Image: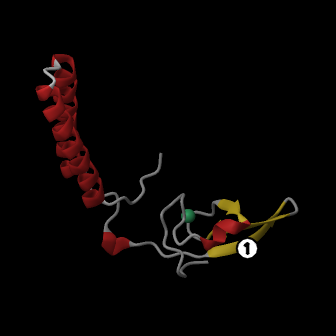
Amino acid sequence: MKDDLISRSALLKELSDYEKELREDREIAIETDDEQMLFAIMNQDTAICRIRRNVLHMPAAYDVDKVVHAKWLGKPLGGYSTVRCSNCRRTFAENSGRWKYCPECGAKMDGGKE
Ligand SMILES: [Zn+2]
């Protein structure tokens, strides 16, 4: 699997939102004296803490100062119109030429090497 760019802060927000849901579920479990539900929530809460720690320590996939610039090159292939990334040379269906980043190598498609 290739690295891609995701937002660490967006992922942490998702985890926080999930924790909020867990807190609400925990209140229900306590009110209804549901030990099984409470135990399950505690396990999920522990897992979220571990995931949060890993997300915080995960190295950046790309150095933002080293953005690779490339462009889509038209390339007929087997009677079909396709586009090829000028950086990694991977070929995609023609309508992929509207993508702003190459899904294979992550190059920003705003010009660059032929
Ligand atoms: Zn590429």
Mark 1 neighbour density, 10 Å: few (under 14) some (14–19) many (20 or more): some
Residue that extends furthest to the top in the rendered view of this protein: 36
- Specify whether 70 is left or right of 18: right
Residue that extends furthest to the front in the rendered view of this protein: 32
For residue 38, which quarter of the picture?
Answer: top left
x, y percentage for residue 102? 54, 65
- Specify whether 111 is left or right of 9: right
The residue singled out by tag 1 in the image is 74
- Specify whether 58 is left or right of 90: left
Q: Residue at x 73, y 73 (%)?
A: 74
x, y percentage for residue 45? 18, 34
x, y percentage for residue 73? 68, 74
Q: Nearer the viewer, residue 46 or 61?
A: 46
Q: Secondary structure at mark 1?
A: strand
Q: Residue at x 29, y 59 (%)?
A: 10
Amino acid at circle 1: Gly
Residue that extends furthest to the right in the rendered view of this protein: 79
x, y percentage for residue 83? 70, 68
Quarter holding the C terminus? bottom right
Q: Nearer the viewer, residue 44 or 28?
A: 28
Residue 68 sits above or below residue 14 on the image? below
Ligand 1 resides in the quarter of the picture at bottom right
Q: Classify mark 1 as within 8 Å of ligand 1 or not, answering yes or no.
A: no
Q: Nearer the viewer, residue 25 or 105?
A: 25
